[in-house]
């Protein structure tokens, strides 16, 4: 099957530890087949199935040793399908105009989420390393997210003051003791802000807070804060200590 020159070249590639493991494995398979091992025996030695050995032999017979090489877009895993330029352009537009499930547009994508999107949209499979190479083609990088702050209007501030006074009045009427520890302005972020996401180079992922969430959640959170004795008016801008904020936010989401 292998010519003398191809056999020597296959041996050289198999011994070259700098080559990818999959390409070396294919060369090893052809060497064993050339040495009169059956497909079943070669499959047992290399821990693959017979159809795989047969496919590698066909690739060699069609394209020579070139057919055994890893494609530069495969990411180290054989048999992956590469997206063409038109599909890459379409994917880039799709990633910019839509959001990863459970997040907002502009907050970035995870490797796993994009792989699922590519499989669903283009019926192509990518490995984790192959997707990183695709991100390089897209011009994306792995970045840490930052918080997206919303500027509160005077109307929002007035609304907060009215609702807070009403909550405190209700607690006073029911005789609930409130120990002022901190103030309002606690933010419920829709996702973690310290993790990293893939986003276009130079465009840091923005993680929005819960300002635009339903007011029901807003009220529930304030009531829990009030019941914990955490409400206190402190000039016009108010903050919570980090430790207490995390504790309260976790309790606010219990049972939801």
Image (spheres, grey):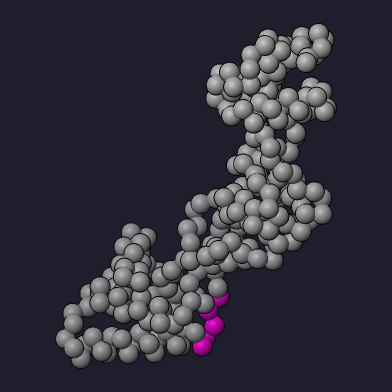
Residue 50, position in %: x, y? 62, 27
Q: Position of residue 40 (x, y in %)?
A: 59, 22
Q: Is residue 50 visible?
A: yes
Per the rendered image, the range of residues in magenta is: 151-155
**Secondary structure predominantly adopted by residues drawn in magenta:** loop
Displayed quadrant of residue 233: bottom left
- Rendered residue at 23%/85% (across/down): 171
Q: Residue 24: where, in percent of width, then height?
A: 67, 20
Extreme residue in the left direction: 175
Looking at the image, which residue is at 62% across and 47% down? 142
- In the rendered image of this protein, does residue 256 appear above or below residue 201? below
**Quadrant the C terminus occupies:** bottom left
What residue sits 59% from the left and 61% below the top? 100
Quadrant into which the N terminus falls:
top right
Q: Is residue 97 magenta?
A: no
Q: Is residue 215 above or below residue 135?
A: below
Q: Nearer the viewer, residue 170 or 42?
A: 42
Q: Is residue 12 left or right of residue 243?
A: right
Counting from the top left corner in percent of width and height, residue 230 is at 29, 73
Hey, which quadrant is residue 36 in on the image? Answer: top right
In this rendering, the count of numbered labels is 0
In this rendering, position of residue 120 left or right of residue 249: right
């Amino acid at each position: 099957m292998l010519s003398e020159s191809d056999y020597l070249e296959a041996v050289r590639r198999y011994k070259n530890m700098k080559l990818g493991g999959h390409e070396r494995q294919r060369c090893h398979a052809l060497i064993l087949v050339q040495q009169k091992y059956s497909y079943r025996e070669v499959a047992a030695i290399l821990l693959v199935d017979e159809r795989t050995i047969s496919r590698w032999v066909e690739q060699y017979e069609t394209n020579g040793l070139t057919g055994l090489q890893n494609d530069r877009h495969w990411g180290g895993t054989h048999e992956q399908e590469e997206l063409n330029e038109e599909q890459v352009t379409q994917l880039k537009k799709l990633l910019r105009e839509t959001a990863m499930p459970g997040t907002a547009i502009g907050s970035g994508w995870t490797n796993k989420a994009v792989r699922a999107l590519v499989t669903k949209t283009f019926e192509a499979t990518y490995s984790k390393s192959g997707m990183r190479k695709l991100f390089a083609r897209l011009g994306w990088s792995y970045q840490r997210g930052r918080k997206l702050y919303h500027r509160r209007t005077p109307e929002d501030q007035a609304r907060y003051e009215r609702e807070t006074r009403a909550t405190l009045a209700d607690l006073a009427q029911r005789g609930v003791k409130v120990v002022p520890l901190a103030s309002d302005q606690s933010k419920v972020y829709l996702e973690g802000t310290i993790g990293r996401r893939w986003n276009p180079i130079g465009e840091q992922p923005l993680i929005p807070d819960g300002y635009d969430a339903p007011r029901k959640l807003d009220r529930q959170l304030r009531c829990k804060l009030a019941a914990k004795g955490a409400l206190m008016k402190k000039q016009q801008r108010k903050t919570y200590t980090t430790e207490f904020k995390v504790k309260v936010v976790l309790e606010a989401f219990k049972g939801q």
